[in-house]
Amino acid sequence: MFLESLMFSLSVTGPICLLLFLGWFLRRINFINEPFIEIASKLVFTVTLPTLLFLNIVKSEHGTDIDFSLIAYSLLANILFFLLVVLLTKLFARNRDDHGAIIQGAFRANLAIIGLAYVDNIYGDAGLALAAVYVAFHVVLYNVLSVLILTPKQHKITPKMFFGLFKAIFKNPLIIGILSGVLFFFFTIPVPKVMLDAGQYFADMSLPMALLCAGGSLHLKSLNSDGVIIWFATVLKIIVAPILMTGGAYLLGFRGLQLGLIFLMTAAPTAAASYVMARAMGANAKLAANVIACTTVGSLLTYSIGLLILYRFNLM
């Protein structure tokens, strides 16, 4: 039974690990470069990934129920974990200038790329439909919390700032793709088959291309600096977060797809967007980049262990 659980875990993490490694390797031998990664990432974010999320909602069976109790739990759990991270960071990180980057790196998960890749690998289209709704709510939550924690103390958080934030959120291509899918799904708006087939070609590009770009963006040599702080944020993100939130979901009675989804999303490494936001708001962008790299590499191990345990006890 243990060997069977181990093989299942490796069958899920193996392809994703290989694609990340391939992206890193191709970047190291200069087969792909930074301009390619930038353009390909933009293509994924603005076109192919929104198409994937749109199609998985539109193609869902109309008897499918979205478990909003799961969404509500995950939002509350993420807010409570955010508050825990803020408290621990203030207690253990001496340099206050690093607090914003540490806190964001410890709670903001890479849902749209790594999380979705694992959900797709295990549950397929059925899992992606629920995951799309999960992503929509959490993209909004992560952006609001990131603004709260990254805004310099000398600057006041104003209603105008939040209006601009929500305006930017609803211009987010992922949100547009998800909301469009929900609209087409609930009102049974027909989509011509030729458009569905063409869209599927785009959608099928999303996760492999995104993983290659994520691997190509890793700069492992930069992990030598700020070692203790990086590991502090990393442990919180890929060990403490999935244990607490998956454990809480288990105690509340979630099982199968619901419990698996909570684990796969909370165990995801730090989102690449945390670097962009840290840089834009004057936080420690180098530290943010190091946390992304460390959590991405470390999550390959923690995902494997978590999946082995969940599969071994028939919980997902």
Image (cartoon, helix red, strand yellow):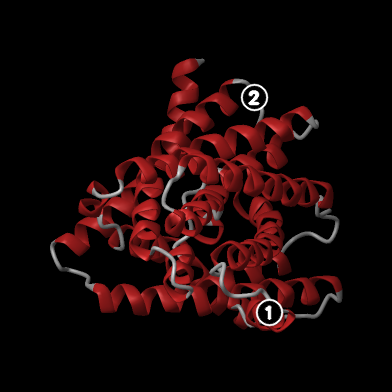
Res 15 seen here: no
Residue corresponding to mark 1: 170
x and y, in percent, of residue 224 in the image: 23, 47
Q: Residue at x 70, y 35 (%)?
A: 256
Residue corresponding to mark 2: 314
Precedes in sequence: disc 1 or disc 2: 1
Q: Work out whether 154 lies above or below 98.
A: below
**Secondary structure of residue under mark 2:** loop
The residue at the far top in this view is 1
In this orientation, which residue lies closer to the viewer: 36 or 183?
36
Q: Residue 31: name its quadrant.
A: bottom left
Q: Work out whether 153 lies above or below 257.
A: below
In this rendering, position of residue 24 left or right of residue 83: left
The residue at the far left in this view is 29
x and y, in percent, of residue 169 in the image: 65, 76
Residue 315's label in the rendered image is none
In this rendering, position of residue 181 left or right of residue 287: right
The amino acid on which the numbered mark 1 sits, given as a three-letter code, is Phe
Q: Residue at x 16, y 60 (%)?
A: 28
Q: Residues within 10 Å of mark 2 (few under 14, many from 20)?
A: few
In this orientation, which residue lies closer to the viewer: 17 or 222?
222
**Secondary structure of residue under mark 1:** loop
In this orientation, which residue lies closer to the viewer: 150 or 298?
150
In this rendering, position of residue 307 left or right of residue 226: right
Q: Residue at x 58, y 45 (%)?
A: 85
Q: Residues within 10 Å of mark 1 (few under 14, many from 20)?
A: few
Rounded to the nearest angstrom, the CA distance separating label 1 from label 2 is 38 Å
